[in-house]
Amino acid sequence: MDADERIFPMIELRTPAEIHEMRAAGRFVAETLATLRDETKVGTNLLSIDARAHDLIRKAGAESCYIDYAPSFGNGPFGKVICTSINDAVLHGLPHDYVLRDGDLVSLDFAVSVDGWVSDSALSFVVGSAREEDLRLIDTTERALEAAIAAAVIGNRIGDISASIAAVSHGEGYSINTDFGGHGVGRIMHGDPHIPNDGRAGRGFPLREGLVFALEPWLLATTDELRTDADGWTLRSADGSRGSHSEHTVAVTADGPIILTDRSFLGVD
Ligand code: MG
Ligand code: MG
């Protein structure tokens, strides 16, 4: 045991065989998000997105990580199987009776367990006609996620991932809130290590073969302050500006990062 392991005793490493087992959950999360994005249009009710996700979970024999989720920061249990964060909402959006309108910015965040392994992923998109500034915000979170994944290699440290997210985000003029960030993923949804969306390169836990985590940059257009809705879950920008969120579950391997929730095999990004 070296000094880093004494500081981070809860970090678990997965064998190649375990990472192979985790692919089923990743694939299901990827397929579900691609399906839901496809089906979500102007006129779609957020409750029907949740109902559809629930149906897909049931058919697949998967288990929702959200429905019974009751962490200290929420007004739990969550009671739904997907987070729908619209416009100035960015994280933990509790689906409610709302019909999407032209130009709405939608973030979907979805996590399930399949065969006892969790995968967690999120994406953002606009329904109907998009505003240029919304597309730039979404594009920046996607590029920040790509940079984070590229930094998820053996020999780097957690701080290298954090710094790469920050470089892309700050490069586009967005500020960063570090209250919520990436996290270890395994048998449960939220484990160690925590991966802040801003930090110093070369610092923090060294990345090892077998680390599996969710990387999840999220940005607000013109603030880094959040407020919580009366529902006790939905987090919105303090100034009403819009938010975007991109997340993948990634395994650090000897062959480089593997994106377990990759949607590219479906012919979509
Ligand atoms: Mg998530
Ligand atoms: Mg997550």
Image: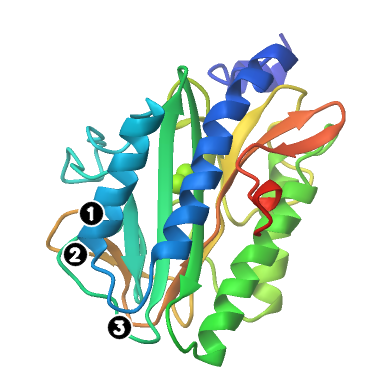
Figure quadrant of residue 74? top left
Looking at the image, can residue 95 be seen? no
Label 2 residue SS: loop
Give the residue drawn at x 32%, y 82%: 240
Which is nearer the eye, 122 or 155? 122
Which is nearer the eye, 30 or 193? 30
Tell me if mark 3 has few (under 14), some (14-19) or many (20+) residues whose alpha carbon lies within 10 angstroms of its own.
some
Label 3 residue SS: loop
Gap in angstroms between the C-alphas marked 3 and 2: 20 Å
Amino acid under label 2? Asp
Residue that mark 1 sits on: 233
Residue that mark 3 sits on: 101
Up-down relation of residue 15 to residue 89 (above or below): above
Gap in angstroms between the C-alphas marked 2 and 1: 6 Å
| 176 sits left or right of 127 in the view | right
- Of circles 3 and 1, the one toward us is 3
Gap in angstroms between the C-alphas marked 3 and 1: 22 Å
Up-down relation of residue 52 to residue 88 (above or below): above
Looking at the image, can residue 132 be seen? yes
Which is nearer the eye, 103 or 174? 103
Residue that mark 2 sits on: 229
Total marks shown come to 3
Figure quadrant of residue 63? top left
Return the disc, 3 or 2, that comes first in the chain's sequence.
3
Expressed as whole percent of the image width and height from the top left, the position of residue 19 reads 66, 21
Label 1 residue SS: loop
Q: Quadrant of the N terminus?
A: top right
Marks 2 and 1 close (CB-CB < 8 Å): yes
Give the residue drawn at x 86%, y 26%: 254
| 130 sits left or right of 161 in the view | left
